[in-house]
Image (tube, rainbow, N blue to C red):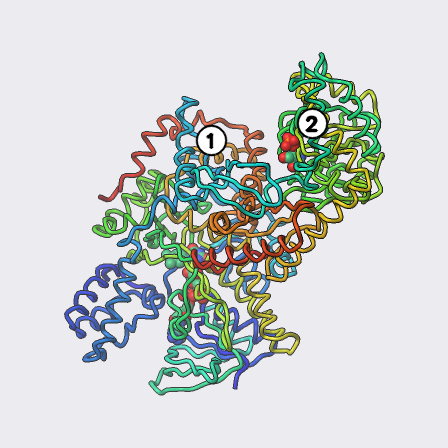
């Protein structure tokens, strides 16, 4: 069955055939073709290997054979190089640079920087844009090449549009007058003011947990809560998609970390059974977000909390995105699931609905509070929230719980529904559940980067998220809706986005859709 | 009048014909070649490829004449990872894609196409499909914009016309169907590898060897007839120089990538055939279906050989397309509905991510520092080595492995450091050296 060793290699034969074809010497072509391997003949089925002899006279047929053989022998791309910058910018991922080479920490960052520069030159770098004025439902921004644009703004996490709310601004001005811009030091020393205590109480009322600790950022609250509580021999079960502050806290606290499948409570139960089968002495912290900020979904917290109790594990839920913006009276996912006051530990951030910076950790235990203050390094060893921040959050908490809060959430959800409806009607995929975050799935990073570049000039400011925020190959636009978005504005944005995606597909000539699997 | 005519009778075509015939449809499958015969391919079949054969009841026949193993050695710049594809990932793959996780096997094999394609063609015939070999399709019959049949040349030279409700293009990279319908190509990725290989007797190896160094790679895998398939590949930009002396550069590449394998082949190997090769491997997608036609296998999506996945993907298409066509032919759903479901699976996110993975790998850039360190971090972490291998082979989604929190955890769990590996000693100088065309 196999061919002998005495035969010449296909490359040599194809060169002979090509030479003969260019001369119109079909006899040599036919004679040589007989020696070409079965491998090639059965693969390059578009070449009429057996019919070379009869090509005589039919000039365009012969020309076609020459063209096809040339393309096979030396494909066009070896002759026409592409724009190296654009290719480099579109092909790489940030993680490709995670472990740079070399012992000089300063110089070894340069590879990564070259890539950033290529992304910037090709205007596919979505980071580090700056605002020119207070953002509302429309914002004016400048990209990092200094190009300015204006568009419907889905980049703010100001879900209830508090940034332009008069009462919020007044609260900030009053605190500035009463206490000045500085927080005097760590909250453990003299960084807090009287309104800090008021804020702790207000937050406690909102989540139904009495003992609240403030942190300078949400990130610090998540990181501090985890490292404050968990020791090397303890265990952490964390949802794969939980926020970075929790993931990094877990890594810093213990090597016993299991990342369970997103939202899968049954798998938590199995892991807990497994851990408790081996270890009855140490603690287990189970960690999840409430509303997940990149997928817009949330776990069944009722079952999750019950499962944790069965195995003497402790549950921590991060409500950074949902508290204030959704749920009855702004109580978020906890309120939706009837869990106010009954989750072990709740943490949140003020950087979204609360229109400020900062974060908190809440529980029913005064002991836990004191312990985290002492051992969660980001509370003890970082300056307290400033008085202005504190006052803003306090005022925000008041509005959130008032009838005005309900009205704002009503407007917010009208815009959310309009946006999701218009996107879905246009055949695009919105992930998750109706919530202030509308993740629009794209998938391929190149497609997302090009679409993002187009949107910049078309009047929609959308944040594109890709690896490492999302797993490789599932990039998306994270559209953050506000109470001030009018439904018609949201629909208009959806139309523009659809156009940009379609044009990007055409530009890349891509046939991939964005369905999973 | 047939229910289906399949053009091409190899991995994608014979399988599609067999699966449709088994469901009781009248199927004609034609091929311009006769069988057994070879076609360009290094014929490595990953465990999901083997599992398809098992699900179809054909694996035993293959294993009777082909050596198979479970563990594979993947060696990158001297960093060795030995592992296998886990059964639970295989089951999840079949469940997610085909709705049923049965029949998985964990072995892989390298099966000469003359052996494998013959088994597939016979199975199609046994299932009741009518097989015509030495039959070249020369025309599609199109009526009212719809493909309704084929015209072709029978072995005796006669022109023959046949009609069917659907024509399946399983006719490979240079698809006749695609050319005739002037189908466009999408997502073209011109950068690819040149690949040259041959068959050697005289030595035996325990597990398949996949080695990579700089911009070159080699594979040595036991195959049929007590021979080993020995393959080298590199970036197509270097092909012109490589081709100036194929046998010499073939050995030079082997020696460069793995001096031990180079020595084994030189000292103990006897080459049994000429050296085969190609660099015509630019990747693309084509439209999947249209009125009266559907594409499967290389015809719908061609990718570089560097992850050895084309045959397995051809099997996958055969199962997906035949299941879809069955629903339509049995009046369960409309043609548009079933084709949309085929398309969703073939053009979804996971498929796109893997396509990108292969195309990026096919550029054969030297591994970066972080990639090599990841390989070091994986050593000793068997579960993750196995998952990496499964990801490389498109069993597990790229997005599951290449996810930030997973990669951070891999780093944290590292048992080894880079200390024992010469590649890290003067990394910058070595990387520069790797950019030099070895054959220039
Ligand atoms: C160098 C190289 C190495 C590879 N190595 C591997 C590997 O290790 N593992 C792996 O899984 N994949 C590998 N592949 C990919 C693999 O070979 C293909 O994906 C696979 O062959 C596709 O099968 P198919 O049935 O779609 O097409 P093909 O195998 O190409 O079959 C198409 C058939 O259609 C017939 N045909 C074409 N036109 C007509 C016509 N007009 N009338 C009648 N019949 C016609 C042809 O004669 C042919 O038999 C490799 C590819 C290359 C190029
Ligand atoms: C879920 C979640 N937790 C915590 C944080 C951190 O909050 P902050 O921005 O206040 O540091 C964020 C915001 O980035 C978040 O999305």
Q: Position of residue B333 (x, y in %)?
A: 64, 74
Please say whether residue B14 is visible from this viewpoint.
yes
B126 vs A205, left or right, is left
Q: Chain of mark 1?
A: A
Res A372 → quadrant: top right
Q: Secondary structure at mark 2?
A: helix
Q: Quadrant of ligand 1?
A: bottom left
Q: Chain of mark 2?
A: A
Neighbour tally class for label 1: few under 14, some 14-19, many 20 plus, Cα within 10 Å: some
Front-most of A360 and A241?
A: A360
Front-most of B274 and A449?
A: A449
Read off the residue under disc 2.
A172
Front-most of A56 and A386?
A: A386
Res A117 → quadrant: top left
Residue A367 vertical placement versus A46 (above, below): above
Which label was assigned to residue A99? 1
Nearer the N terminus, badge 1 or badge 2? 1
Question: Which quadrant holds the N terminus of chain A?
Answer: bottom left
Res B152 → quadrant: bottom left
Task: Classify mark 2 as within 8 Å of ligand 2 or not, answering yes or no.
Answer: no
């Amino acid at each position: 069955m196999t061919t002998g060793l005495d035969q010449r290699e296909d490359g040599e034969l194809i060169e002979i055939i090509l030479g003969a074809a260019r001369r119109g010497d079909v006899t040599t072509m036919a004679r040589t073709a007989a020696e070409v391997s079965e491998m090639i003949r059965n693969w390059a089925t578009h070449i009429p290997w057996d019919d070379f002899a009869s090509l005589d006279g039919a000039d365009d047929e012969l020309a076609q054979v020459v063209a096809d053989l040339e393309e096979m022998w030396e494909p066009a791309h070896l002759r026409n190089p592409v724009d190296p910058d654009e290719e480099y910018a579109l092909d790489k991922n940030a993680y490709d640079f995670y472990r740079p080479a070399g012992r000089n920490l300063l110089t070894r960052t340069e590879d990564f920087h070259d890539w950033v520069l290529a992304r910037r030159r090709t205007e596919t770098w979505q980071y580090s844009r700056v605002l020119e004025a207070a953002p509302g439902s429309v914002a004016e921004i400048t990209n990092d090449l200094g190009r300015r644009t204006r568009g419907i703004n889905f980049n703010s996490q100001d879900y209830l549009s508090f940034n332009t709310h008069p009462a919020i601004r007044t609260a900030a001005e009053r605190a500035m007058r009463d206490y000045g811009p500085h927080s005097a030091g760590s909250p453990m020393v003299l960084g807090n003011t009287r309104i800090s205590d008021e804020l702790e109480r207000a937050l406690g009322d909102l989540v139904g947990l009495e003992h609240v600790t403030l942190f300078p950022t949400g990130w610090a609250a998540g990181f501090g809560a985890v490292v404050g509580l968990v020791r090397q021999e303890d265990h952490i079960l964390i949802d794969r998609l939980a926020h970075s502050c929790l993931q990094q806290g877990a890594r810093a606290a213990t090597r016993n970390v299991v990342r369970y499948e997103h939202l899968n409570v049954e798998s938590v139960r199995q892991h807990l059974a497994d851990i408790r089968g081996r270890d009855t002495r140490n603690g287990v912290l189970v960690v999840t977000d409430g509303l997940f900020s990149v997928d817009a979904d949330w776990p069944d917290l009722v079952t999750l909390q019950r499962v944790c109790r069965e195995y003497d594990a402790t549950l921590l839920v991060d409500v950074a995105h949902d508290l204030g913006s959704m749920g009855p009276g702004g109580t978020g996912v906890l309120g939706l699931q009837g869990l106010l006051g009954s989750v072990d530990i709740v943490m949140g951030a003020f950087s979204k609905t609360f229109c400020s910076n900062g974060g908190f950790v809440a529980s029913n235990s005064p002991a836990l509070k004191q312990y985290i203050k002492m051992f969660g390094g980001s509370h003890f060893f970082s300056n307290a929230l400033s008085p202005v921040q504190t006052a803003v959050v306090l005022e925000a908490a008041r509005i959130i719980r008032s009838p005005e809060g309900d009205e704002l959430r009503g407007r917010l959800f009208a815009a959310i529904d309009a946006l999701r409806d218009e996107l879905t009607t246009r055949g695009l995929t919105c992930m998750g559940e109706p919530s202030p975050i509308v993740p629009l799935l794209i998938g391929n990073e190149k497609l997302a980067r090009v679409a993002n570049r187009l949107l910049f000039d078309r009047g929609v400011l959308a944040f594109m998220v890709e690896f490492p925020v999302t797993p490789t190959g599932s990039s998306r636009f994270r559209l953050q809706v506000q109470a001030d978005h009018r439904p018609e504005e949201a629909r208009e944005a959806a139309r523009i986005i659809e156009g940009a995606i379609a044009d990007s597909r055409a530009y890349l000539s891509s046939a991939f859709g964005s369905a999973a699997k | 009048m047939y229910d289906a005519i399949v053009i091409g009778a190899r991995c994608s075509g014979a399988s599609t014909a067999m699966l449709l015939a088994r469901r009781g449809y009248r199927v004609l499958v034609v091929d311009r070649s006769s069988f057994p015969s070879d076609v360009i391919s290094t014929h490595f079949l990953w465990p999901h490829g083997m599992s398809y054969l098992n699900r179809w009841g054909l694996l035993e026949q293959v294993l009777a004449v082909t050596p198979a193993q479970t563990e594979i050695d993947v060696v990158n710049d001297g960093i060795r990872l030995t592992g296998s594809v886990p059964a639970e990932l295989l089951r999840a793959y079949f469940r997610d894609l085909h709705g049923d996780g049965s029949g998985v096997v964990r072995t892989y094999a390298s099966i000469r196409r003359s052996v494998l394609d013959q088994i597939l063609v016979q199975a199609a015939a046994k299932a009741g499909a009518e097989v015509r070999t030495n039959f070249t399709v020369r025309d599609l019959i199109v009526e009212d914009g719809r493909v309704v049949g084929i015209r072709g040349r029978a072995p005796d030279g006669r022109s023959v016309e046949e009609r069917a409700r659907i024509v399946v293009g399983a006719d490979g990279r240079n698809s006749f169907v695609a050319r005739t319908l002037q189908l466009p190509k999408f997502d073209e990725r011109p950068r690819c590898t040149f690949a040259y290989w041959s068959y050697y007797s005289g030595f035996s190896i325990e597990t398949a060897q996949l080695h990579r160094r700089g911009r070159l790679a080699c594979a040595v895998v036991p195959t049929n007839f007590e021979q080993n398939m020995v393959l080298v590949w590199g970036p197509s930009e270097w092909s012109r120089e490589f081709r100036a002396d194929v046998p010499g550069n073939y050995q030079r590449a082997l020696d460069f990538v793995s001096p031990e394998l180079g020595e084994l082949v030189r000292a103990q190997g006897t080459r049994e055939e000429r050296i085969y090769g190609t660099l015509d491997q630019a990747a693309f997608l084509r439209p999947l279906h249209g009125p009266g036609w559907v594409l499967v296998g290389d015809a719908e999506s061609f990718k570089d050989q560097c992850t050895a996945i084309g045959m397995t993907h051809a099997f996958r298409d055969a199962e997906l397309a035949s299941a879809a066509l069955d629903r339509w032919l049995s009046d369960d759903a409309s043609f548009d509905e079933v084709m949309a479901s085929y398309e969703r699976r073939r053009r979804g996110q996971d498929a796109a991510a893997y396509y990108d993975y292969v195309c990026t790998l096919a550029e054969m850039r030297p591994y970066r520092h972080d990639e090599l360190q990841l390989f070091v971090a994986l050593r000793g972490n068997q579960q993750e080595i196995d998952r990496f291998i499964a990801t490389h082979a498109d069993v597990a989604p790229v997005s599951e492995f290449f996810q930030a929190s997973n990669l951070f955890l891999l780093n944290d769990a590292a048992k080894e450091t880079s200390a024992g590996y010469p590649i890290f000693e003067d990394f910058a100088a070595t990387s520069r050296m790797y950019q030099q065309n070895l054959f220039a």
